Amino acid sequence: MKPTITAFALSPDEGKGQARDMRVRWAFEEVGQPYDVRLVSFAEMKERAHLALHPFGQIPTYEDGNLALFESGAIVFHIAQLHPGLLPSDINARARAVGWMFAALNTIEPTILEAEAAEYLEGDKPWYADRVPLIEARIRMRFGELSTWLGDSEWLDGNFSAADLLMVTVLRRLEGSAILQEQANLLDYVERGVQRPAYQRAFAAQLAVFEEATRSI
Ligand SMILES: N[C@@H](CCC(=O)N[C@@H](CS)C(=O)NCC(=O)O)C(=O)O
């Protein structure tokens, strides 16, 4: 039995690899685990059947046998625990990698999400123009710190791991932005991630869903 994940039937990002099933697809591809995808509409995501899998009515979810999971980080962590290749076997190195997984999702990603939420929810408010530089300063601070840590290293802590997988997908949320362009080593780091064959396969699979959906509209 292959695990099944959920993904957008029609992704708002038009298949640019930003929807969070991308992280899970990439993890599956890195470890060579085939998977099935169940596509859900926005309406279906808020229905009882999906809410039983995901209390917040979002994607991605993961089902395998009698296990159901939500939260992309938890799903990637589970895949990394089941298969070799995404976490070091040395217990201390593994703990550090898990720490970086949390850093990607809990320290870096929230600063980016704050910018997205402010634009979406407050973009038409009179205070928005004053908020933007404050939010951007926080992102710049975290990116600067991350850039200093990374230095000339290829990956965050030794070999490529689930932490890099998550961090690259988080940083990609600001792909093309001036803030990311300012940190040359972070740009190179993202590029190393997206050039991995497993990433490319995951990206192509996600894009194919969008292309198929728009063909039939
Ligand atoms: N922290 C969650 C966030 C999940 C999330 O925000 N999913 C988005 C797609 S990337 C979603 O389903 N958005 C639709 C909605 O919230 O209604 C995770 O990492 O899985």
Image (cartoon, grey):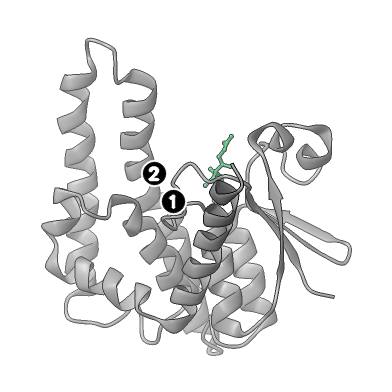
**Figure quarter occupied by ligand 1:** top right
Task: Indicate the amino acid at tag 1.
Answer: Asn
Residue situated in front as seen by the camera: 28 or 185:
28
Query: Residue 27 bears which disc, if any?
Result: none
The answer to whether residue 49 is above or below residue 152 is above
Q: Position of residue 41 (x, y in %)?
A: 67, 39
Badge 2 local density, few (<14 within 10 Å), some, or many (20+)? some
Tell me the distance, in whole angstroms, between the alpha carbons under discs 2 and 1.
6 Å
Camera-side residue of 80 and 196: 196
Q: Is residue 6 above or below residue 159?
A: above
Residue at 69 percent across and 78 percent down: it is: 34
Q: Position of residue 6 (x, y in %)?
A: 68, 54
- What residue is shown with label 1? 106
Position of the N terminus by quadrant: bottom right
Residue at the front extreme? 216
As drawn, 45 above or below 11: above
Number of dots carrying numbers: 2
At 38% across and 40% down in the image, what residue appears? 113
Residue at the right extreme, as displayed:
66
Q: Position of residue 159 (x, y in %)?
A: 39, 87
Front one among 92 and 4: 4
Tell whether label 1 touches label 2 (CB within 8 Å): yes
Instruction: Please rate how many residues cluster around mark 1, counting C-alpha atoms within 10 Å: few if below 14, some from 14 to 19, many from 20.
Output: few
Residue flagged by tag 2: what amino acid is it?
Pro
Q: Quadrant of residue 170?
A: bottom left
